[in-house]
């Protein structure tokens, strides 16, 4: 692996001199370590290689590599990460073809679940001490890692979704206040329309993945209009009988609520055509044009990488929590993230998996920005950017945290009919009932 | 025939010495193959060295394989030689095809008979023809096949003919060919700059707007015409293919034939229909066959531009999604098998042409 | 056999044109004009999309994402000549608004309303806090061109990171050299091997008689339509047991296997149309199939071999999926091919898609060079020479 000028040289130096630090190089705060992690920290696994694959590329890949560099130096285990586009196809072929890497990063737990059902995934609870897992993850994370009777992996990072981004200067100029309830949000939307503009920018076009931003909106509204039990039954039912169908009035109600925002005249800049025809990454640009064509954009925190160059968080743009609709359901927060699962059982792989269950594995990434840590042992001050610290605080304040439902669903729905059904409905190809029925039909029996 | 100075007299009897040399050569080539294979697999040289060795090893190894296998075959008594030699020629290709495509296709066929619950039957095939999305995909594929093939082949032919008569032949052909050299991700960006909904980015909408029209979301909301806009992308990419093959065929039309026709006072149009078209008919059939198959398999254009959404679903995208996203192998397999059945008419036509051939 | 000189052949066409049609010289010139005119039109339309990409590749990111590439050319655009004129207060969206004697709805004002031939007023911002701008049609162009995209693609991006202690550092991303070399190492053998194998098979199908000939030919045509995706998993499984996974050899064989149906079919169609008489006379002279193939058929098939070589080369060069499956998952970045490196470059979410403008041209250079290199084999007269010979 070609690693890069000065950095490379300094790493090489550190590795050479690491004999000095090897003993007890791991942080002293680590407790409840698995036998393999302890062995690794004692330098007993020096020289081993752990292969890893996932969808991080480019900057994310660099941040990942830098984040594990310290651990590699302490233990002498080389973590070789390969990121790819078309990740689903690649990993499906690799696993079925018997060439699975040691650790795979799944941004879609639904895909992981299908491998668990095939009996290919190693149960991490067999070697990571239960005390550590329960201490370092909140219960909802552990629940979501529980698949087919095993602990299918460890949650390694996440992104916040329930965020509405806005142009601070435009808000100030027009005298708009940040809404804290759904009614205020709708009142603000009406105000913006009356003022002659459009409150929202929405774009769901994303090439092969067209439709996914629409599923995010559906999930947000589901969380705000029905119980968590229903959301769980909808997104990852424990049994087929329990499943909440898309044709259920609860889901249809959420879609109709969504239609109130998306299809009300002048609510979305460019109307229905713009929703269907705008690349999701281009959608927020309208907030920053002169004059702004819209004032608000709901999207996960990664969207800031699509904002025009040179904008500063806190000065040019800010975010607020997408308010709840029905008080009964509190302040839910929607997240998405990456679960790392293990396909080959060797001591060094176990040690690395245990490492990923600790906040330390994200430290440089958190400082550099672009990820949030699901680990309880991550203090807020590790975050390098105000935005992410703010999101982490919002998550901490929320009454419940739920994972992106479409990522939990089986691939046929979550990365297939759900995207397609929403897109067909938005673009007017089919009516809502047909769309919901067709989404349901794709659910594997 | 000046080239054929070597008079390899065909001997009706077995020639043991030649057979020994042939088989010995074959054996040593196989050993070299295995050694090279091991070295290339496990050797430590840099990629550049390996690539260079591989080119020499692969090409000369394959050539040597044919040479010695043929020598062995030719040393056999004539009756046996006639039986064995054809397999020396087609055998290696068939072996590779068998490993890489034919056996996987057979497995696919068996997989297609099991549905997701593991029940044996034709339920996957029923679904392939009845689901709304599949019906949409079939309809679109027929559109792709008819419009896409017609445009690609006729434009390829037109350009090849025009270029053949133009002083600017090379530059014109290169520019038409250029899209073929562009990777699909690059092509995706190129056509974003044409079709984008925003008239500040999409050229088509900029033109429409300056003509006083409303900008359109060409690929998403202009249904069902968005399929045609996607087909345009394919035609733009693939016309170079048709042009190269047809152009090569036109170069093969004997000059004296054309001269004679011109002397007889034939017009250019007559020459085109009476001489050029019949002379290149074989190539045209080839091009049409392969372009029909391209359009049936069409995948990347649709996947990159719309992902099969907005009523642009095609068989290739459905297959890919069932295979890798839904992980519904049986269903994906059934789609692949039906695709295979869809080309039966093309196969029959080709077989008929094939059977007319005289051989030696 | 006398190999006809292509340039001579071309000259003889010219000669015949001149001598045969001296009387109709004017008509000839007109027809040449029509030929070149139509050709130019088609080529022009064909090139516009690529031209757009080419120009975009030299534009800064912000320009690429906010304005059309054609704005680099001089064009007439509405240019603000007077800013920040106050708006009439107390207006609503559903009532017409009169400004400077012109009445229009608010939504029209925000798009700009012409008050005379070359002046318009545009309402910027909302009904309460907006402003009016007076704009005139002016000639303008957008001249900022830069090599930034090419630099970032070729030399690698720079990533700003922060250490836990708050200090920042820069990581220099990989350049494209390794990607280029890997792509060449994958593509050249993947092009030559299937051509050689397919040419033998094509000759066998075209001129040899053997049992099972029809059935095997049908298999070849049928496999043309089989999506290669069905083979990925079984082949990967074989590769794992042969320890071929992640090796160049594995990917060469895979590309050879997947390219064979088309190679065999195309070459068969060419080789089978060669005049029977040439082969007949060779066989009468006592030549064997092997000699005929090597000495006669291969040289005559150069145009077909060259065409297929071009196609196979650029399909393999631009392939992403096969490389990803057989090289991508289990090997580190140092053995990734160009297409993979380019796909990775746009970022996990595709936020840097503007870099694809430059990357597309960089990756196009090699296939285009191959095209130019092999184009000289598409010449008239090969066949003519062989018949006369």
Image: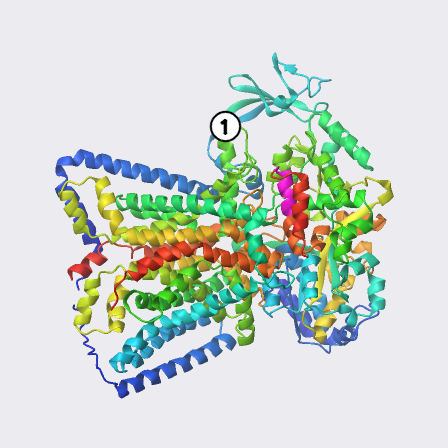
Q: Nearer the viewer, residue C178 or C251?
A: C251
**Rendered view: A86 above or below A16:** above
Residue A317, x across and y down, in percent: 72, 40
For label 1, the crowd category at 10 Å Cα-Cα, with few meaning under 14, some 14 to 19 and many 20 or more, is: few
**Rendered view: C149 above or below A182:** below
Residue ID at (61%, 67%): A96
* Segment colored magenta: A419-428
A424 within the magenta span:
yes
Q: Nearer the viewer, residue A49 or C382?
A: C382
Q: Quadrant of residue C170?
A: bottom right
Residue C57 in sight: no
Q: Quadrant of residue C289?
A: bottom left
Residue A240, x across and y down, in percent: 74, 56
| Image quarter hosting the N terminus of chain C | bottom left
What secondary structure is marked by label 1? Answer: helix
- In the picture, measured across the screen, residue A102 lies left or right of residue B137, that is right
Residue B110 in sight: yes
- In the picture, measured across the screen, residue B286 lies left or right of residue B143, that is left
Residue that label 1 marks = B210
Residue A342, x across and y down, in percent: 70, 68
| Image color mode | rainbow
């Amino acid at each position: 692996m070609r690693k890069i000028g000065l950095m490379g040289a300094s790493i090489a130096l550190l590795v050479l001199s690491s004999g000095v630090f090897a003993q007890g190089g791991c942080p002293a705060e680590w407790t409840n370590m698995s036998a393999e992690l302890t062995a690794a920290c004692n330098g007993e696994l020096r020289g081993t290689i752990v292969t890893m694959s996932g969808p991080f590329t480019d900057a994310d890949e660099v941040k990942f590599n830098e984040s594990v560099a310290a651990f590699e130096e302490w233990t002498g285990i080389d973590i070789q990460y390969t990121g790819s586009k078309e990740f689903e196809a690649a990993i499906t072929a690799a696993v079925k073809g018997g060439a699975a890497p040691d650790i795979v990063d799944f941004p879609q737990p639904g895909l992981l679940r299908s491998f668990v059902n095939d009996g290919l995934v190693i149960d991490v609870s067999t070697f990571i001490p239960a005390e550590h897992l329960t201490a370092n993850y909140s219960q909802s994370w552990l629940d979501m890692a529980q698949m087919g009777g095993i602990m299918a992996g460890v949650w390694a990072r996440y992104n916040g979704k329930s965020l509405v981004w806005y142009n601070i200067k435009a808000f100030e100029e027009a005298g708009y206040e940040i809404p804290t309830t759904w009614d205020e949000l709708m009142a603000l939307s009406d105000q913006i329309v009356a003022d002659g503009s459009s409150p929202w920018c929405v774009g769901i076009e994303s090439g092969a993945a067209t439709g996914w931003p629409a599923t995010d909106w559906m999930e947000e509204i589901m969380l705000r209009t029905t119980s968590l039990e229903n959301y769980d039954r909808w997104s990852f039912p424990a049994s087929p009988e329990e499943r909440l169908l898309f044709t259920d009035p609860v889901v249809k109600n959420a879609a109709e609520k969504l239609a109130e925002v998306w299809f009300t005249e002048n609510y979305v800049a460019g109307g229905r055509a713009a929703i269907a025809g705008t690349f999701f990454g281009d959608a927020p640009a309208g907030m920053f044009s002169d004059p702004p064509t819209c004032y608000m954009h709901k999207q996960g925190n990664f969207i800031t990488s699509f904002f025009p160059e040179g904008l500063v968080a806190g000065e040019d743009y800010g975010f607020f929590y997408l308010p709840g609709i029905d008080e009964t359901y509190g302040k839910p927060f929607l997240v998405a993230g990456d679960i790392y699962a293990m396909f080959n059982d060797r001591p060094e792989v176990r040690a690395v998996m245990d490492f990923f269950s600790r906040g330390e594995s994200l430290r440089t990434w958190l400082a550099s920005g672009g990820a949030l840590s699901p680990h309880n042992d991550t203090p807020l001050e590790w975050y390098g950017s105000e935005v992410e610290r703010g999101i982490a605080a919002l998550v901490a304040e929320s009454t419940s945290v739920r994972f992106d439902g479409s990522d939990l669903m089986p691939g046929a729905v979550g990365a297939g009919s759900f995207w397609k059904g929403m897109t067909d409905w938005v673009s007017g190809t089919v009516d809502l009932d047909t769309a919901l029925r067709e989404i349901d039909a794709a659910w594997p029996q | 025939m000046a080239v054929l100075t070597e008079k390899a007299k065909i001997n009706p009897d077995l020639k043991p010495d030649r057979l020994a040399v042939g088989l010995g050569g074959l054996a040593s080539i196989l050993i070299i193959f295995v050694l090279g294979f091991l070295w290339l697999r496990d050797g430590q040289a840099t990629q550049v060295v390996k690539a260079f060795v591989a080119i020499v090893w692969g090409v000369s190894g394959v050539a040597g394989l044919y040479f010695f296998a043929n020598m062995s075959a030719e040393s056999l008594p004539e009756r046996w030689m006639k039986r064995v030699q054809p397999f020396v020629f087609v055998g290696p290709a068939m072996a590779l095809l068998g490993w890489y495509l034919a056996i996987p296709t057979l497995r696919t066929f068996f997989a297609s008979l099991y549905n997701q619950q593991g029940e044996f039957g034709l339920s996957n095939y029923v679904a392939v023809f009845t689901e709304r999305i599949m019906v949409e995909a079939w309809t679109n594929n027929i559109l792709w096949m008819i419009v896409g093939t017609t445009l690609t082949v006729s434009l390829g032919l037109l350009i090849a003919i025009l270029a053949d008569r133009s002083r600017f032949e090379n530059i014109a052909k290169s520019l038409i060919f250029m899209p073929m050299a562009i990777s699909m991700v690059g092509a995706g960006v190129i056509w974003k700059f044409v079709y984008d909904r925003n008239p500040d980015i999409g050229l088509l909408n900029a033109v429409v707007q300056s003509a006083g029209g409303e900008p359109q979301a060409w690929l998403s909301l202009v249904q069902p015409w968005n399929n045609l806009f996607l087909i345009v992308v394919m035609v733009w990419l693939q016309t170079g293919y048709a042009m190269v093959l047809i152009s090569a065929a036109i170069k093969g039309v004997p000059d004296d034939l054309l001269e004679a026709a011109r002397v007889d006072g034939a017009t250019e149009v007559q020459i085109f229909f009476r001489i050029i078209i019949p002379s290149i008919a074989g190539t045209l059939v080839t091009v049409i066959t392969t372009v029909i198959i391209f359009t049936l398999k069409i995948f990347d254009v649709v996947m990159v531009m719309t992902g099969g959404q907005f009523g642009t679903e095609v068989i290739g995208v459905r297959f890919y999604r069932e295979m890798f996203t839904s992980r519904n192998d049986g269903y994906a397999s059934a789609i692949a098998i039906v695709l295979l059945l869809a080309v039966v008419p093309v196969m029959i036509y080709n077989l008929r042409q094939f059977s007319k051939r005289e051989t030696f | 056999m006398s190999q006809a000189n292509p340039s001579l052949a071309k000259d003889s066409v010219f000669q015949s044109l001149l001598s045969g049609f001296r009387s109709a010289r004017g008509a000839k010139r007109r027809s040449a004009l029509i030929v070149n005119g139509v050709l130019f039109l088609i080529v022009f339309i064909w090139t516009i999309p690529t031209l757009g990409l080419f120009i975009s590749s030299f534009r800064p990111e912000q320009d690429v994402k906010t304005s059309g590439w054609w704005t680099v050319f001089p064009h007439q655009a509405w240019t603000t000549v007077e800013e920040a004129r106050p708006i009439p207060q107390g207006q609503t969206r559903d009532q017409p608004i009169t400004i400077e004697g012109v009445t229009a709805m608010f939504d029209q004002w925000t798009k700009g309303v012409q008050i005379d031939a070359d002046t318009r007023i545009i309402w910027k911002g909302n009904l309460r806090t907006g402003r009016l701008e007076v704009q005139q049609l002016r000639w303008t162009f957008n001249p900022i061109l830069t090599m930034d995209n090419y630099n970032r693609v070729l030399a690698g991006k720079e990533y700003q990171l922060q250490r836990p202690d708050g200090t920042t550092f820069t990581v220099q991303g990989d350049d494209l050299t390794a990607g280029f070399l890997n792509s060449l190492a994958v593509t050249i053998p993947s092009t030559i091997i299937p051509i050689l194998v397919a040419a033998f098979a094509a000759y066998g199908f075209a001129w040899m008689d053997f049992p099972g000939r029809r059935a095997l030919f049908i298999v070849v045509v049928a496999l043309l339509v089989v999506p290669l995706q069905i083979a990925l998993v079984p082949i990967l499984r074989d590769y794992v047991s042969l320890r071929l996974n992640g090796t160049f050899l594995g990917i060469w064989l895979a590309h050879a296997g997947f390219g064979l149906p088309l190679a065999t079919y195309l070459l068969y169609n060419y080789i089978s149309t060669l005049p029977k008489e040439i082969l007949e006379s060779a066989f009468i002279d006592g030549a064997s199939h092997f000699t005929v193939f090597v000495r006669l058929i291969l040289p005559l098939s150069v145009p077909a071999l060259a065409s297929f070589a071009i196609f196979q080369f650029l399909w393999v060069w631009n392939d992403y999926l096969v490389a990803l499956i057989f090289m991508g998952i289990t090997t580190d970045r140092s053995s990734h091919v160009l297409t993979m490196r380019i796909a990775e470059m746009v970022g996990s979410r595709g936020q840097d898609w503007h870099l694809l403008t430059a990357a597309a041209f960089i990756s196009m250079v090699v296939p285009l060079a191959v095209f130019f290199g092999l184009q000289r084999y598409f010449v008239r007269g090969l066949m003519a020479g062989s018949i006369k010979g």
